[in-house]
Image: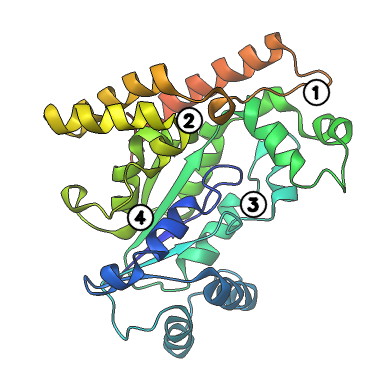
Amino acid sequence: MRFTYHIGLHCTDADRALDGLLAQSGTLARQGIAVARPGVFRPALREAMLELRGAPAPPQMQARLLAAICDREAPAHVLLSSDSFLCVPQRAIADGTLYPLAGERAPWIRNLFPDAPAHFALALRNPATLIPALQARFADRESWEEFVGRIDPEALSWTDMVTRLRDAVPDAEITIWCNEDAPLLWPDLLARLAGTAPGAAPEGGDDFVAELMSSEGFARLQGYLSENPPRDAGHRRRVAAAFLDRFARPEAVADDYDLPGWDADRVTRLTERYEADIARIGAMQGVTLLLP
């Protein structure tokens, strides 16, 4: 049995992948794949993690957890997805550090089923858009000025966060992608989360791109792919990117924030730092970075 822990992160997936795979849970179950329902597994895992605090779960607890999170006795692969596995949104950034609890909490997750192979999957996002989106989730409790004043945006490093995660769970497989690339990577992402072979990806691989394009543009994309079958997944992504550039709906792809201190110069600096982080992460041992 293998477990994939889709740990988010906040303001990236928004349960889009989980919802899509849950819609196919019956088909996936016949392939030995269990997609855990959040209303059931999240409370059960949260309680177990707080009780164990990183200690390996004993066999009896593992059996209870497995019974709570899926209705198959011995699935080959189990997907558990929550953007708050590592922490609640309010604690995602503190003192110039992205996910300061990552090194502590990752083993809490890993040791729920300590003897089973583990796969951690997560999306990263440009802090230039992540920070405003994250603060919007708890704006009623902390103002924009208070939030930015305590987090030190220019000090944030995804390289540091991923290094702490990798070092905390060295035996786990880690797959990372950029949230900005997710629509083009969607078929591969669904396959990796479900634990299927890339060539046997679950349905819905075009759903994300379809949400971002006009209906006319998406119809043209489908027609082009039908008449000109892509050579491979990379070729297909390049075709989809070309159509998305031409037919994207502006309101679906815009990430503009009119906030105090969030000017073009700052956005550029944070974006350049983000791109440098991604390049370093792509060269890390023990981490798979997915790119279009």
179 vs 74, left or right, is right
Number of residues whose C-alpha sits closer than 10 Å to that of mark 2, classed few (under 14), some (14–19) or many (20 or more): some
Residue bearing mark 2: 180
**Residue 114: numbered disc:** none
Q: Return the disc, 3 or 1, that comes first in the chain's sequence.
A: 3
Q: Nearer the viewer, residue 131 or 284?
A: 131
Q: Nearer the viewer, residue 125 or 207?
A: 207
Label 3: state its secondary structure. loop
Q: CA distance from mark 3 to mark 1?
A: 28 Å
Q: Are marks 4 and 3 in contact (CB under 8 Å)?
A: no
The amino acid pointed to by label 3 is Leu
Q: Nearer the viewer, residue 165 or 194?
A: 194
**Residue 101: numbered disc:** 3
Q: Return the disc, 2 or 1, that comes first in the chain's sequence.
A: 2
Q: Quadrant of residue 87?
A: bottom right
Q: CA distance from mark 4 to mark 3?
A: 23 Å
The amino acid pointed to by label 1 is Leu
What residue occupies the far front of the structure in this picture?
A: 216
Q: Is residue 130 above or below residue 273?
A: below
Residue under the point 59% across and 24% down: 254
Q: CA distance from mark 2 to mark 4?
A: 18 Å
The amino acid pointed to by label 4 is Leu
Q: Is residue 232 above or below residue 139?
A: above
**Residue 259: numbered disc:** 1
Residue 6 coordinates in the image, percent (x, y)? 46, 55
The amino acid pointed to by label 2 is Glu
125 vs 117, left or right, is right
Q: CA distance from mark 1 to mark 4?
A: 35 Å
Q: CA distance from mark 2 to mark 3?
A: 24 Å
Label 4: state its secondary structure. helix
Q: Return the disc, 1 or 4, that comes first in the chain's sequence.
A: 4
